[in-house]
Image (tube, rainbow, N blue to C red):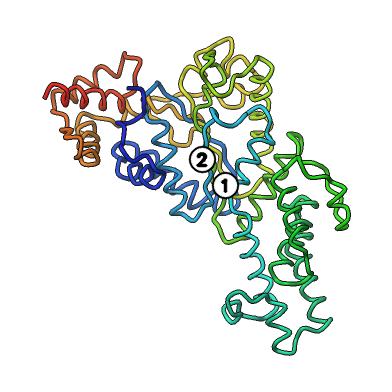
Amino acid sequence: MHSEFIEIPDQSEPYSFLCAESLTCGIRFLSDFWQEKYLREYVRYGGSKIKFITGRSGSGKTHFLRLMTAIAQKENYKTVRFSAKNIWMHDFREIYVEIFRQCDILKCLEAASRRVVEEMGFDHHDIPAGMKFIDYLSQNGMGDALTKREIRSQLKQIFLDNPMLDNNFALACSMLTGSILGYPILEEQNRDLLLAWLESDRSIKLSQLRALGFYPSRITKYNARHMLRSLAELIHMGGYSGLFIAIDNLEILTSRSSLEPVHYTKMKREDTYESIRQLIDDIDSMKNIMFVYAFDRELIDNENAGLKSYQALWMRIQNEIVGERFNRFSDMVDLDRLALQEYTPDVIISISESLASLQNNLSLAPLTKESALEIASQARTGAVGIPQLIQIAMQEVKNNV
């Protein structure tokens, strides 16, 4: 068994988050710190951050991403989580598209439309469900040219005058928000065209957009980071604390297995490293966004194909000073090192108790003190992380019974 935690019969996403939040023994040393320092403070108040999570197989990387995603949701972040096994990483456009698809942009635009209503001195709660703002104004004798000009002025101020938004992105959002308000009028076909462009749908023709007085270029790997910055700003404008993005299984870059859905050539792998390097260099120009990449230690240890093979990236993410104590501010987080410091035999027993309570239908019993001591000792020299050692030990106890 090679999963990060014992297999759970119902692997639906809500259940995964439930499990993540139930299994916090030991790892709270880091997750509580991230919640306080980054999600509640630094990122919420306009900062942006990139973190890297590594460790041996079974060290709990996927579990940690699930836990932090669940925590970010509780802290009112728009969350995105996907595996590098399913999305090409060498072209940042592909990453932008996946993030966009998981973000429900219309919900953010509806929030922006409510902001226009409030800026004009109205309460959006007074507008009947299903009625557009302009119809509400007309019904109350206020749908005149002066009021319409004020709507345009508010849309310009919110979107086009915002320096964090790409001009084309801002114009598309302005027109879409106008369609939600009912003014300026936007036909449904044109609305769908604008949404398709924002999602980087290559099937649409740019000439179709020019008929709207909109002259955008296509979204490519060269401008996708700028578009992501705009998306993060829109999400924040929509009332969210920010955007939290968790990307798992980055070790796929070094895989030679033909069974994987994506396979990286040397050129694509180096393009991926360069893409991450550019993101690191651009992150300070973004606001309210946090990236977390997770990968097996193989991505560090592999001298020929791993991170160290691309010096421009490795120089930016390596931990130059390694102290005796685990540094929770470190951008390169080693879960094995954290486990050796925090996963005492008592914590190991607590983890097994949490697993057993979640797996009561499988009759798994918590570990004994003797087993916990053995796991703590084995983890110092073995190739498998403590969380997976726990699941293996529990499985062995079940099989013996």
Most foreground residue, 83 or 39: 83
In which quadrant of the rendered image does the N terminus lie?
top left
Q: Which residue is mark 1?
A: 102
Q: Quadrant of residue 258?
A: top right
Q: 73 above or below 362? A: below
Amino acid of disc 1: Gln
Q: 314 above or below 106? A: above
* Disc ID at residue 377: none
Secondary structure beneath label 2: strand
| Real-space Cα separation, disc 2 to disc 1, in angstroms | 8 Å
Question: What residue sits 63% from the left and 70% below the top?
Answer: 114
* Disc ID at residue 81: 2
Describe residue 288's horizontal placement relative to residue 14 as left or right.
Answer: right
- Residue 217 point in image, percent of width and height: 83, 43
Question: What residue sits 34% from the left and 37% below the top?
Answer: 27
- Residue 338 point in image, percent of width and height: 36, 29
Describe residue 399's horizontal placement relative to residue 20 as left or right.
Answer: left
Residue lying at the far top in this picture: please name it: 304
